[in-house]
Amino acid sequence: MKKIILATLGAVALVSSFTAFAGPDFYVIEKARADKHAEAQHQAACDAATMNNSLLPMPIAEAALDYSAVSVDSPGDA
């Protein structure tokens, strides 16, 4: 009787530890890599769009209000 119980317990332990021998889940690993790659591409595209918007010329309405340029008839020129 003792041998049957020990054999049963051994079989239960072996079956319950089967997932440890299964190995890595490559689908999950590749999906995580693809998601990370897509996120990096999205971030790069957003950064490029932000950089392009900051390099655009100043709109005419804002250029009219830009007082940093000195006009030709300024009093300091005389």
Image: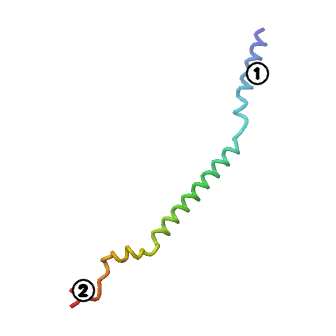
Report the disc number at residue 58: none
- The type of residue carrying mark 1 is Ala
Which quadrant of the rendered structure holds the C terminus? bottom left
- The type of residue carrying mark 2 is Ser
Name the side, left or right, on which 38 lies relative to 61. Answer: right
Separation of disc 2 and disc 1 at Cα?
Answer: 97 Å
Which residue is the site of mark 2? 74
The part of the image, by quadrant, that contains residue 41 is: bottom right
Name the side, left or right, on which 78 lies relative to 43. Answer: left
Residue 40, percent from left and from top: 57, 57
Report the disc number at residue 11: 1
Instruction: Give the residue at the far top of this rendering.
Output: 1
Q: Secondary structure at mark 1?
A: helix
Whether 66 is drawn above or below 18: the answer is below
Q: Secondary structure at mark 2?
A: loop
Q: Nearer the viewer, residue 52 or 6?
A: 52
Name the side, left or right, on which 48 lies relative to 34. Answer: left
Q: Residues within 10 Å of mark 2 (few under 14, many from 20)?
A: few
Nearer the camera: disc 2 or disc 1: 2
Labels 2 and 1: the sequence-earlier one = 1
Q: Nearer the viewer, residue 51 or 23?
A: 51
Residue 17, percent from left and from top: 70, 28
Whether 60 is drawn above or below 44: the answer is below
Identified at 72% across, 34% down, the residue is 21
Which quadrant of the rendered structure holds the N terminus? top right
Identified at 73% across, 21% down, the residue is 12
Q: Count numbered badges in the picture.
A: 2
Whether 15 is drawn above or below 58: the answer is above
The part of the image, by quadrant, that contains residue 15 is: top right
Whether 26 is drawn above or below 47: the answer is above
Identified at 61% across, 55% down, the residue is 38
